[in-house]
Amino acid sequence: MVQLLVLYFLSIKATHGYEIQRFIQLNYMDEWNSIKSGSIYYAMSKLEKKGYITLVEKIGLSEKSRKVYKITEEGKSALRKMALEELQKPLTGVKSEKFLVYPITANMSKEDLLDGINQHLHSLNEQMQRIQYWFDQKKEGASAIELSTFNVMFDTLNSQVKWHETLKVNIDGVISETQKITQIIKSTNFAE
């Protein structure tokens, strides 16, 4: 997700890692998401090696000079691909990276988003059917911990289905909010 966030940010404007790092810190992403501001430079290095971003300017002459990057055409394609992949991932606990929805939704059409959501919902429903089958086979002789485990599995999948259904129903609002966040990033220098 860090690479996705960096590509998203650089798809809006060319900038340096410090600005992206400050954006993460100012939005408390370290607190409510598993994205850590310190991982930005490592992600940018990997993205540059892959040809997804390119150096456009070096500000300053010291060791602490800031390197300004922009996204490449390959990076734009990778951003879309990463966003679709992220959309297919399960929600993982209270710090799920997927809750940071705007980098996922920013560079895809509404149709692609809905298609990705529907694919993931189909996958979740298939998992639910497999667990239901397994539960039906074991429930008679199941221990208390096994029954509790099944309940957690069902609750987890049901919560994921509800979240994705809510995303689907509210996709226009999500797209609108994503556009607002994009404009804020475009017009704000978070490094100051």
Image (cartoon, helix red, strand yellow):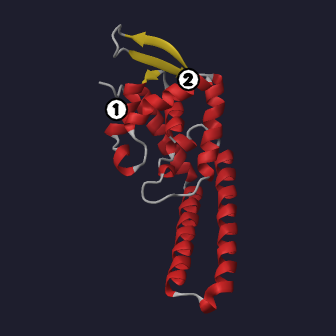
**Closest to the observer, 42 or 92:** 42
Q: Residue 31: image x %, image y %?
A: 34, 48
Residue 134 x, y percent position in the rendering: 67, 79
Q: Which of marks 1 and 2 is in front?
A: 2
Amino acid on which disc 1 is placed: Arg
Q: Which residue lies furthest to the top in this view?
A: 61
Q: Residues within 10 Å of mark 1 (few under 14, many from 20)?
A: some
Residue pictured at 43% horizontal, 35% vertical: 39
Name the residue that disc number 2 marks.
48
Quadrant of the drawing holding the C terminus? top left
50 left or right, relative to 97: right
**Label 2: few (<14), some or many (≥20) within 10 Å?**
some
Residue 14: where, in percent of width, then height? 48, 21
| Residue reaching furthest to the left | 192
Label 1 – label 2 distance at C-alpha? 20 Å
Q: Earlier along the polypeptide chain: callout 1 or callout 2?
A: 1
Residue 9 in view in this figure:
no
Residue with the mark numbered 1: 22
Q: Which residue is at 34% across, 32% downward?
A: 22
Task: Kindly identify the residue that appears in the image at 60 percent across and 35 percent down.
Answer: 79
Q: Which amino acid does label 2 sit on?
A: Glu
Residue for point 54% across, 83% down: 147
Question: Within the image, what quadrant is residue 153 found in?
Answer: bottom right
